[in-house]
Image: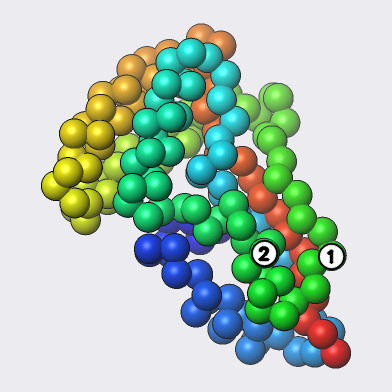
Amino acid sequence: MWASTIKAGDVEPLISHVVKLLKPGGYIQWEEADLVHPVIKGAKAQTFGEKAHSLYSNHGLYGWASDIHNRLQQAILTILSSKRDNFQSFLAQKCTETYLLALAEIFRGIRTTCAEDLLPLLSECETELQELSALRNKEMVYNWSPIKVLAQKGE
């Protein structure tokens, strides 16, 4: 998963390098966290999700992950399967807890690089994240969507 490593949505250099490493007929399985299209249950989580989406969009983060199958296809790979999934129900709550902790770190990273006009939105997201963290075992789910793509390099 590269979601938080790729800056400014510029995933093409990584894809280009991966394609160079593949032998003709070789396969790549790419698993990614789609932070832009989360699985959400609960009103507070929904409100938070809308603000987080706006923050990511305005800061140029994570949009590429939702489109990874197209980006791999543009790199002249054949897409054999592509799927956005949900976590199994027995894992959803644990994944929510883990993701909420990760979001605190993500927001700290955004704070160090974001434009000044995004600071109010970031502060709102941080406040709502604290509120969500207090609700985490009360029928609230907030998870990223796992994406899996299997692609093959031509002969």
Q: Is residue 37 above or below residue 40?
A: below
87 vs 139: above or below? below
Q: Residue at x 48, y 35 (%)?
A: 98
Mark 1 surroundings within 10 Å by alpha-carbon count, few (fewer than 14), some (14 through 19), many (20 or more): few
Residue 27 visible in the snapshot:
no
Q: Decide: is 123 above or below 128.
A: below
Residue at 80 percent across and 89 percent down: it is: 24
**Can you tell which mark lies on residue 70?**
2
Query: Which label number is shown at residue 69?
Result: none
| Residue ID for mark 1 | 80
* Residue lying farthest to the top in this orientation: 138
Mark 1 and mark 2 lie on one chain; the one further toward the N terminus is: 2
Q: In the image shown, does 60 or 33 lie closer to the viewer?
A: 60
| Nearest the eye: 7 or 108 | 7
Question: Residue drawn 65% across and 29% down?
Answer: 91
Please identify the quadrant where the N terminus is shown.
Answer: bottom right
Q: Amino acid at mark 2?
A: Asn
Residue 58: give x, y in percent of width and height. Answer: 33, 48
Q: Residue at x 43, y 15 (%)?
A: 44
Task: Identify residue type, mark 1.
Answer: Leu
Judged left or right of residue 149, residue 110 is: left
Rendering coords of residue 153 (x, y %): 78, 81
Query: In the rendering, at what x and y percent does residue 37 appear?
Result: 56, 39
Look at the image and tell me whether residue 152 can be seen. Answer: yes
